[in-house]
Image (cartoon, rainbow, N blue to C red):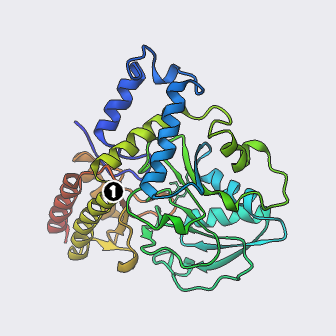
């Protein structure tokens, strides 16, 4: 029986995407070869990657001044590749640290240049988003994490800045309309809302590139990837294919407006239940709660383990909090049906009745 999949990533994908991907493994578009067997420079795959690049721009409503790449190494590699390409040794970049991923991004950037942490929410275990802060005008960019997967907070507005804005959107990309054009670079590991693990989507405004004095190894140089039409070396062909299937699904279902509507329905159901049940305690400030990852606790470890055990028995997986923070976490990405959240909520209500 299919599980209710609350995993934080890799995570739930639309059933029809899984079906189409599995068919392509056996026979890609009826060509008599598997998607796993075709060369990345064949017209078959060039069509796939070009459609994927165009679809990302279409969903984000971005124009010719942007390019889209499908890279490897995860969002973690972007923590390094962004400053490598954009931050000179004696220059400074501004970072908002709202969680462990932002913190890791800062550590990487410090290897390449100076870093100003202009906003940190560490004082309250990253349980809120700090939106008021000032940024030195000579900094070369401002970096933020739009959704904090581990802590369960999300930026519900885009940070206001005149600097080139860079976002790690790994865990909420394509989940809602955003003014993407306010950003100069957006990156996201695909394994939550945009496909399978193994590929990282990078959307870059071309005018920010080529401004550092550093000699960049071609494989790490965004410009070289753009010049090579996103085929500088062998991309993760199958992962890119799962992304195009996922992007087509998002478009067909009604695009980002529809994804946001569904995300709000799921999150409203879960958070309103959490707020009403004394056994559970939400962690994050109400106004900053993530629509993708809800974090909460049960006051004591015993109840937490009991609840996790009952989730398991009912086929609900991925409810355990990140290993660095503990507690409970429910991830509700684009493909999650409201029926899964309803099943969880029913269990929570019953659990509260028995243990409250
Ligand atoms: N940033 C965010 C917001 C994440 O959620 C994650 C992974 N869950 C990462 C970065 C790291 O991504 P990866 O494992 O693909 O390197």
Residue 18 lies, in percent from the top left, at 34, 34
Q: Is residue 144 left or right of residue 346?
A: right
Q: Nearer the viewer, residue 8 or 304?
A: 8
Q: Is residue 348 left or right of residue 252?
A: left
For disc 1, the neighbor class at 10 Å (few under 14, some 14 to 19, many from 20) is many
Tell me if I can see residue 191 in this picture: no
Q: Is residue 112 left or right of residue 242?
A: right
| Residue at (84, 70) in percent of width and height | 90
Q: Is residue 80 left or right of residue 261?
A: right
| Residue at (54, 31) in percent of width and height | 46
Q: Is mark 1 within 8 Å of ligand 1?
A: no
| Residue at (21, 70) in percent of width and height | 273
| Residue at (19, 53) in percent of width and height | 339
Q: Quadrant of ligand 1?
A: bottom right
- Quadrant in which the N terminus is drawn: top left
Residue 238 lies, in percent from the top left, at 49, 31
Q: Which quadrant would residue 249 be assigned to in this image?
A: top left
Q: Which quadrant would residue 330 be assigned to in this image?
A: bottom left
Tell me if I can see residue 338 in this picture: yes
Q: As displayed, is residue 200 above or below residue 346?
A: above
| Residue farthest front in this picture | 64
Residue 168 lies, in percent from the top left, at 55, 61
- Quadrant in which the C terminus is drawn: bottom left
Residue hosting label 1:
332
Q: As displayed, is residue 187 above or below residue 4?
A: below
In this figure, what is the number of numbered marks? 1
Provide the secondary structure element on which disc 1 rests.
Answer: loop
């Amino acid at each position: 029986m299919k599980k209710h999949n609350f995993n934080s990533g890799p995570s739930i994908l639309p059933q029809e995407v899984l079906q189409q991907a599995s068919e392509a493994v056996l026979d890609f578009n009826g060509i008599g070869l598997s998607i796993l067997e075709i060369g990345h420079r064949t017209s078959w795959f060039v069509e796939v990657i070009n459609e994927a690049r165009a679809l990302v721009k279409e969903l984000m409503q971005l124009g010719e001044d942007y390019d889209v790449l499908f890279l490897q190494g995860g969002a973690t590699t972007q923590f390094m590749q962004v400053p490598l390409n954009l931050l000179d040794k004696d220059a400074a970049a501004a970072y908002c640290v709202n969680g462990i991923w932002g913190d890791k991004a800062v550590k990487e950037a410090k290897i390449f240049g100076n870093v100003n942490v202009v906003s940190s929410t560490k004082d309250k275990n990253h349980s809120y988003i700090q939106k008021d802060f000032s940024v030195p005008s000579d900094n070369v960019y401002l970096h933020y994490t739009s959704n904090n997967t581990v802590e369960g907070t999300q930026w519900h507005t885009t940070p206001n800045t005149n600097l080139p804005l860079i976002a790690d959107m790994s865990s909420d990309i394509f989940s809602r309309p955003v003014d993407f054009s306010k950003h100069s670079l957006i990156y996201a590991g695909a394994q939550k809302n945009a496909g399978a693990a193994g590929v990282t989507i990078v959307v870059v405004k071309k005018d920010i590139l080529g401004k550092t004095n550093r000699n960049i190894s071609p494989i790490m140089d965004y410009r070289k990837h753009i010049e090579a039409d996103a085929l500088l070396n062998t991309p993760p062909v199958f992962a890119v294919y799962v992304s195009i299937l996922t992007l087509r699904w998002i478009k067909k279902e009604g695009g980002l407006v529809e994804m946001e509507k569904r995300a709000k329905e799921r999150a409203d159901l879960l958070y309103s239940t959490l707020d009403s049940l004394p056994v559970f305690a939400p962690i994050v400030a109400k106004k900053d709660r993530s629509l993708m990852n809800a974090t909460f606790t049960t006051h004591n470890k015993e109840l937490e383990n009991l609840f996790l055990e009952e989730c398991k028995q009912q086929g609900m997986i991925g409810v355990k909090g990140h290993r660095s923070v503990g507690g409970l976490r429910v991830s509700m990405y684009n493909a999650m049906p409201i029926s899964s959240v309803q099943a969880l909520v029913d269990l929570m209500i019953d659990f509260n009745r028995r243990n409250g």
